[in-house]
Image (spheres, rainbow, N blue to C red):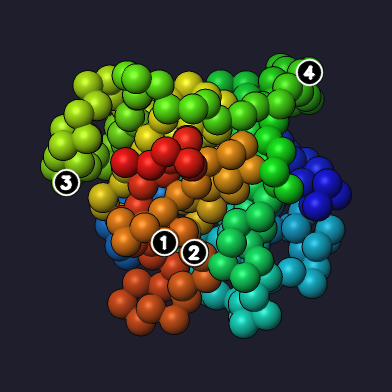
Amino acid sequence: MTEILTLFEKAALSVGPIILEIYSAGPDIRLKGDKTPVTEADEAAERIILTALSKDLPDIPVVAEEEAAAGRLPDISGGTFILVDPLDGTREFIGGHDDFTVNIALVRGGVPIAGVVYAPALGSAYLGADGAAERLTIGPGYDVTDRRPIRTRLRPPAPCALVSRSHNSEATMAFIDEAGIPDRRAVGSSLKFCLLAEGKADIYPRFGRTMEWDTAAGDAVLRAAGGLTLTTNGTPLLYGKHSQEDAPFANPNFIAWADAQKRG
């Protein structure tokens, strides 16, 4: 698994320059068929990542956001596949917020077992697999200048809830209010999983639309750091739901927990 994480890390960091170049210049924006925005940064980053993965891991099928939007989906019946979101938090990216990410995850048997989340504008990345997670500091030359292990925290008396900046919902806020959590923080993209993983927050409820490529990498990091992501039925969030005719690869509502032993 170390070798795959290294390849994911290399692929993710390789798109930092093009994403930040477009971010600084201001992206061109268009709407996809589902009315969600896409920019040339999404498309350029995905092409680079897919080229790298096809070279280094040619036998593992890859489900990527923009390829899926174009109707190009690989056969994942073997049970092992890669999920790629080349630019998670496109609305943050468009709005000039720095909390957008590059996500690459390996899924096996429905479980995200390895993942990389890279935040180019923040100069940080997160890796997770095999029960161990790390936070990386990325230097101006897009190289790793520091690595340190991270771990979730036990739920404190006054827990902190994370909510989506661009996709919050009344149902999410009602859940947080009912749970009696006064401290809440709005964050974009898959960074919410990573903040749970490094012990800076405690719960991330999401009652609204997400796709598997949005969550798999962050979920892998969180699980490796000691957390857990559950559906509202209390079962672990699973991946590979391609057979849903109305919404292939769509997630149900879920709750990500930092303290996997003390939920609710």
Residue 182 located left or right of residue 31:
left
Q: Which residue is mark 2?
A: 238
Q: Alpha-carbon distance for marks 1 and 4?
A: 38 Å
Q: Which residue is mark 4?
A: 145
Residue 35 pos. (x, y %): 28, 57
Kind of element beneath mark 2? loop
Q: Alpha-carbon distance for marks 1 and 3?
A: 19 Å
Q: Residues within 10 Å of mark 3 (few under 14, many from 20)?
A: few
Residue 123 pos. (x, y %): 62, 21
Q: Which residue is mark 1?
A: 235
Nearest to N terminus: mark 1 or mark 3: 3
Q: Alpha-carbon distance for marks 3 and 2?
A: 22 Å
Q: Alpha-carbon distance for marks 4 and 2?
A: 34 Å
Tell me the residue at 52%/26% (across/down).
Answer: 153
Q: Which mark is residue 171?
A: 3
Q: Amino acid at mark 4?
A: Thr
Q: Nearer the viewer, residue 140 or 130?
A: 130
